[in-house]
Amino acid sequence: MLEKEVEKALVHAVRKHGGIAPKLTSPANAGMPDRLIILPPGKVCFVELKAPGKKPRPLQVRQMARLTQLGCMVRVIDHPNQIQELLHEIQQQPTFKQHLKEPGQRP
């Protein structure tokens, strides 16, 4: 199985859940995760996709650690059977609005 097959399955599943999964391209930031998953209402996760058994490169690991330190949810998946669990985990996280104390106030 190829990485693009895992990616295609992820994008399809996200759409079925009412979300979007834009592909990330960041020429000035090599190693960024492949996709940004956005599910309603405002649930977000960066996802690095790999072929089964493959692992992220060191640069990718550093970028994922950087995003995690900034408070972002970041995951790696390498098989379509991980997608439903990932979507469930994303849906369980609080939204940005749930962190706010008053409208317009930052957490």
Image (cartoon, helix red, strand yellow):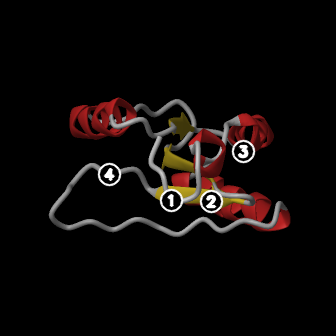
Q: Which mark is residue 104?
A: 1
Q: Do the residues bearing badges 4 and 2 touch, measured as CB atoms within 8 Å?
A: no
| Mark 2–mark 1 distance (CA, rounded to whole Å) | 21 Å
Q: Position of residue 80 (x, y in %)?
A: 72, 44
Q: Secondary structure at mark 4?
A: loop
Q: Which residue is mark 2?
A: 38
Q: Nearer the viewer, residue 21 or 104?
A: 104
Q: Which residue is mark 4?
A: 32
Q: Which residue is mark 3?
A: 80
Dot 4 alpha-carbon crowd within 10 angstroms: few under 14, some 14 to 19, many 20 or more = many
Q: Do the residues bearing badges 4 and 1 touch, measured as CB atoms within 8 Å?
A: no
Task: Give the number of marks.
Answer: 4
Q: Tell which residue pokes out farthest to the front in this image.
A: 102
Q: Could you tell which of marks 2 and 1 lies nearer the N-terminus?
A: 2
The residue positioned 66% from the left and 40% from the top of the image is 79
Dot 1 alpha-carbon crowd within 10 angstroms: few under 14, some 14 to 19, many 20 or more = few
Q: Tell which residue pokes out farthest to the right in this image.
A: 16
Mark whose residue sits in front, 1 or 3: 1
Q: Do the residues bearing badges 2 and 3 touch, measured as CB atoms within 8 Å?
A: no
Q: Could you tell which of marks 2 and 3 lies nearer the N-terminus?
A: 2
The residue positioned 32% from the left and 51% from the top of the image is 32
Mark whose residue sits in front, 4 or 1: 1
| Mark 1–mark 3 distance (CA, rounded to whole Å) | 38 Å
The amino acid pointed to by label 4 is Met
Q: Nearer the viewer, residue 71 or 89?
A: 71
Q: Position of residue 33 (x, y in %)?
A: 40, 50
